[in-house]
Image (cartoon, rainbow, N blue to C red):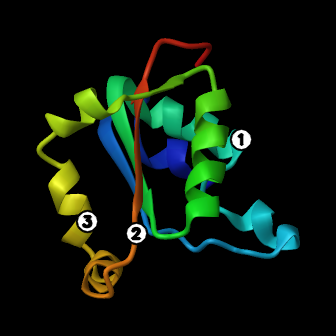
Amino acid sequence: MKFLPNYFRKGQLSKLFFLFPDPHFKTANHRRRIIQRNLLAEYAYALHNGGLLYTITDVEELGSWMADKISAHPCFRQLNSDEIQNDQVVPILFTGTEEGTKVKRNEGTTYLRVFKRVTGPI
């Protein structure tokens, strides 16, 4: 991910999706998770102000962990359920991937969070 700014101009993207990422359960492997404090700065760089970052997982602990990391970053604000329900992309997130289809078929629970890129230090 350190090369992300080489592929996208500042503010070029309007949406970023992290759909059912690998949870890396062991504490020693948490550094390998796709949502990290230093990577969030790169995601904020690529997203334009008002852009959206979507996360969905079937692992509750990972969903909370990602939400905590993203909420702590000054360039992102979590959207509430009213703001999310009007988004046309959200229904597709639950079944648009093989993992999402598997979770739905097994009647599992998913944890969706959507964040908006706000003006910040980047």
* Within-10-Å neighbours for mark 1: few <14, some 14–19, many 20+: few
N-terminal label among 2 and 3: 3
SS state under label 2: loop
Amino acid at circle 3: Phe
Which is more toward the observer, 11 or 90? 90
Do we see residue 96 in this rendering?
no
Disc 3/disc 1 C-alpha distance (Å):
28 Å
Where in the figure is residue 63, as x and y percent of width and height?
A: 55, 56
At x 62%, y 34%, the residue is 41
Of badges 1 and 2, the one in the foreground is: 2
Amino acid at circle 1: Asn
Of badges 3 and 1, the one in the foreground is: 3
What residue sits right under mark 3 in the picture? 94
Disc 2/disc 3 C-alpha distance (Å):
10 Å
Which is more toward the observer, 48 or 84? 84
Where in the figure is residue 86, as x and y percent of width and height?
A: 14, 34
What residue sits right under mark 2 in the picture? 109
N-terminal label among 1 and 2: 1
Quadrant in the picture for residue 15:
top left
Q: Quadrant of the C terminus?
A: top right
SS state under label 3: helix
